[in-house]
Image (spheres, grey):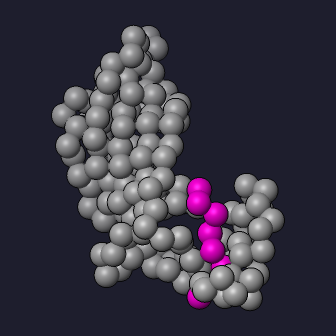
Amino acid sequence: MPVNPELVGRDFPATAPYLVGREKVREFARAVFSDAAPHHDPDAARALGYADVVAPPTFAMVLQDLTLQQLLAEPDSGIELSRVLHAEQRFRYTRPIVAGDELVGRLSVTGLRAMGAATMVTSEAEITDLEGVHVVTTTSVLVVGEEQS
């Protein structure tokens, strides 16, 4: 099944709240080889005016993944994980993510573009706190290959 063109404009419900943990921030920082003190040391983060350790900018992928799981689970999407290549990623922050934040994500499919035997699927996830205040918008482009017969 090809990617469903009716995905464009589809909005998904908010994810369950995700509590950003100090150890999760530290683990992610280690995974991306960031040894910056504010990612690991609460005192260093507080010295910069933050309540706790600050997540590296790409940490927003953890939350975006929760939204993309909704898209991948859609039975009519035509998107099968084994045919997906993550082609592009962008972040637009209002403020950094800090340990102790409780965040939710809402995904929207914003575009489809045929590229030969593949389809580029563009989506945006709006990540907000529980009061609905914007933290970061993540934009992702997935390239979905055609089914092999």
- The N terminus - image quarter: top left
Q: Indicate the position of residue 13 as horizontal and vertical percent values.
A: 26, 61
Image location (x, y in percent) of residue 77: 30, 36
What residue span does the magenta drawing correspond to?
Answer: 51-58
In the shown orientation, is residue 90 left or right of residue 104? right
Quadrant where the image shows the C terminus = top left
Residue 36 screen position, x and y as percent: 77, 68
Q: Is residue 7 above or below residue 144?
A: below
In this rendering, the answer to whether 6 lies above or below 146 is below
Q: Quadrant of residue 57?
A: bottom right
Closer-to-camera residue (143/149): 143
Judge whether residue 29 can be spotted in this image: yes
Indicate yes or no whether the magenta region holds residue 52.
yes
87 with respect to 138 (left or right)? right
Percent of width and height locating residue 132: 30, 75
Residue found at the very far front of the displayed protein: 48
Q: Nearer the viewer, residue 57 or 106?
A: 57
Q: Residue at x 37, y 55 (%)?
A: 125
In the picture provided, is 85 more to the left or to the right than 8?
right
Is residue 24 in sight in this rendering?
no
